[in-house]
Image (cartoon, helix red, strand yellow):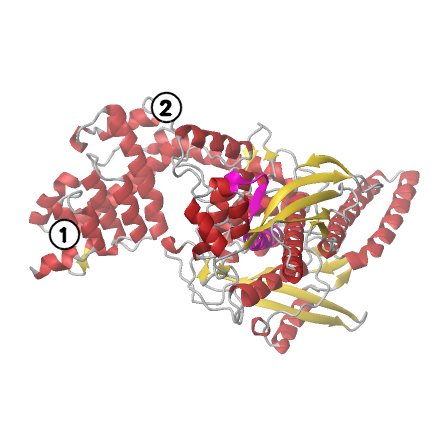
Amino acid sequence: MMVMDELESKRWYQELKGKVNDDILVYQDKRGYLWDKVHPEHLRYFKNNCCGYPFTNHLALTLIVTSNLNLNPASIKARLSPMCVVLRELFQELKLASVHDFDVDIHLSNYLRREILPSHSDNKRSSFLFSYKNFGRKVHKWYSTKLATEQKEMFTPFLFPLPTLDGRDFNVSKSAIEAAKSKRKSETDAISKEFIKIRAEGGFRLNQVRRLRRKYLEAVEVVKTNNYPLPFDFAYLENEERGEVSKELFSFRLWDKPSFTLHHSENFTSTTINKAKARKSTFSEEKNEYFVEFLKAEIVDDETGEPLEETEGFWFLPILEHQLVGSWFQYLSEEQINEKLKILEMYGYKETGVESNNAPFLPSHKGLLAQGTFITNSQRYADGILMNVEVLYITALFGATILDIFTSSGARLGEVAQIHLGIGCLDQGTINDQKTNVVKTSYMFRAIPKGRDELAVFYVNKDTFDLIKEIVFYLRDVNYEGSIPKVKFQYHKSNGLSRPEHPYLFQLHGKHFGHKTFAAILNFICFGLIYETQDKKLVKLKPHLLRHGFATHAVQTEELPVDVVAMILNQKDLEVTGYYSQPTQSQVANVVTDFHTSMITQIDMIKEVLRQPEELQALFERQRKISGPFSKTVGGTCVTNKICPIKFECIGCGTKIPEPEQKHELLDFLGWAEKSKEFYEGKGFNLEVMKIKKTIHDAKVELKEIALIEEYRRDKENEPKLIIRKP
């Protein structure tokens, strides 16, 4: 009786009773029930996807055995899923009633030769074969070494038959690997020529949402101060400080819940209307909220200031207009789902080979992206697009920050997720060059790279720290109204990655971001940035693709040695770095020469994030003795901490940070280089002419990057005037 009570208390027993053979379900060894070691996420997947099939018990035995071998949970999930999916389709296609009917060598060889399920990719076939053989061997080894004779008899019917065929005979594995590499390099090629613009666009988009938030808060204050009734119409000018971009007039309407309900009363029940009038329930002061309705964006004539024609407005409008946030496909008809999938496909967010509906804007985190129940349900009654401005602002801020870090440091997402505000992570220090009396500021963060167990340094820039400071102030003053708490590390928790509790940077409402949240905010900030491979396939910007773009540009365009790039990326295997940095089909020369922006102005970061100044001074002095990092050079600052990779040819070096305040040096250098080219041409020194031409090109590229930095900073400081349309 006590045993049954214990079993009934087990979640896995409750969920799998009657679905899995009892011998498998209640089996235990000296350490306890084997199902106790099954990860909750794996249990959920098994229950929802693997039950009710001829192979269910076989797969259940596989799951409990591998879960008790202390394997990485992520590896188990990565193998369990393709096994279940392909077995399900194979058994259905072959009309197999039991695993005994599964002639493993014949059926698998036919499958690998594409005679069965020809629509499956080589990658899917290769993944299934590896998973099936790998898990099969582990279960058979457990069976032969851990079980007594009577136990073997009990589990013999539930062993998957092992194949004798060799996957190499079918070439699917090699084909799948080559196809994956080719796809990645093709995608890298598509973004490499736009790398600097991708990074700058994140800043411009954040500036746009910053202005929206400032004007929204200003409009709220005007309404409260003057006791104006709602709705309240207002507008402001966009792009006033961007010379080559047309000025646009953005028009809005300010609402709160009661005012919107009463002005659209024909769409609400009498009970709801009465509550809105009385400001009770969801309309109470505690639960009420302001929001805006975006009406239109119009291009404005530079001379007259009059609107000329309507234009697109915010980059994210299609996401809100078509309500693609979260699990958008719930409660929709097949026709409605297909319509929205077409929209996602148009923007490169409909992925092939994915069984479930794509949900690229599913943050799985309170306070990000989701506009709220009232706004979402009321959108159908509005003339324009309803917006929760605070949610859009913090989502854009987080998104722009991770995009900036990816494109400036080449760090992995798992390393960016470790950034915290405690001691030993974020560092800032200054170096005073006694010869020139120039003060330089450095910025960095520390994280444990993949496959390591010690902290490594990742260099970032002043703009990155400005973004981090903005997040810190928002968390402290708005989200927590006090100190920022320590939270549990959530990124890829399912794969067993463990880190201590810290006041992590990427957190909100007391919870650290998971991998789905990171994906959603990056998708949001990059939405509408359309890039195509040479075969016209749309490219979706992902952290790992940006890392490939970083490495490729550093090696192929900047000609940095692979070992230097490996150091920057914190990669141990030079062969992997070599693959990352292989040349694309079309290397472009006119691209940003450095992945870091200005490191010039000191910034008041939270006191606790800084190490002792003496320690920083010692660190930088030690680096200066190696090769002179943070020392002044033409147009910028050197940051390498190894022997100079390009023999002090500083113009165009990927380890130099161009600085706007040193722009005049580059212009002087460019003038000298042009005169030198004329001199060499006159003397017929063709080799010298080729060398100086490359130097001239590199200097012009650095000037272009500085111009973008200057434009971003001007745009950031732009404060448009609030235009009141209807008091």
Left or right of residue 122: residue 295? right
Q: Type of residue at label 2?
A: Pro
Check disc 2 and report the residue beneath it. Answer: 118
User: Which portion, as a residue range, is magenta?
Assistant: 379-407
The quadrant holding residue 602 is bottom right
Query: Residues under labels 2 and 1: Cα distance?
Result: 40 Å
Residue 141's x, y, as percent? 21, 47
Q: Secondary structure at mark 2?
A: loop
Q: Identify the residue at horizontal 23%, vertical 36% (top origin).
A: 162
Labels in figure, total: 2
Q: Is residue 435 visible?
A: yes
How would you rate the neighbour count of disc 1 (Cα within 10 Å): few for under 14, some for 14-19, many for 20 or more? some
**Main secondary-structure element of the magenta-colored stretch:** helix
Residue 692's x, y, as percent? 82, 44
Left or right of residue 10: residue 276? right
Q: Type of residue at label 1?
A: Val
Check disc 1 and report the residue beneath it. Answer: 26
Q: Secondary structure at mark 1?
A: loop
**Which quarter of the figure is the N terminus placed in?**
bottom left
- Would you place residue 606 above or below residue 64 in this image? below
How would you rate the neighbour count of disc 2 (Cα within 10 Å): few for under 14, some for 14-19, many for 20 or more? few
Left or right of residue 79: residue 672? right
Q: Identify the residue at horizontal 88%, vertical 45% (top origin).
A: 674
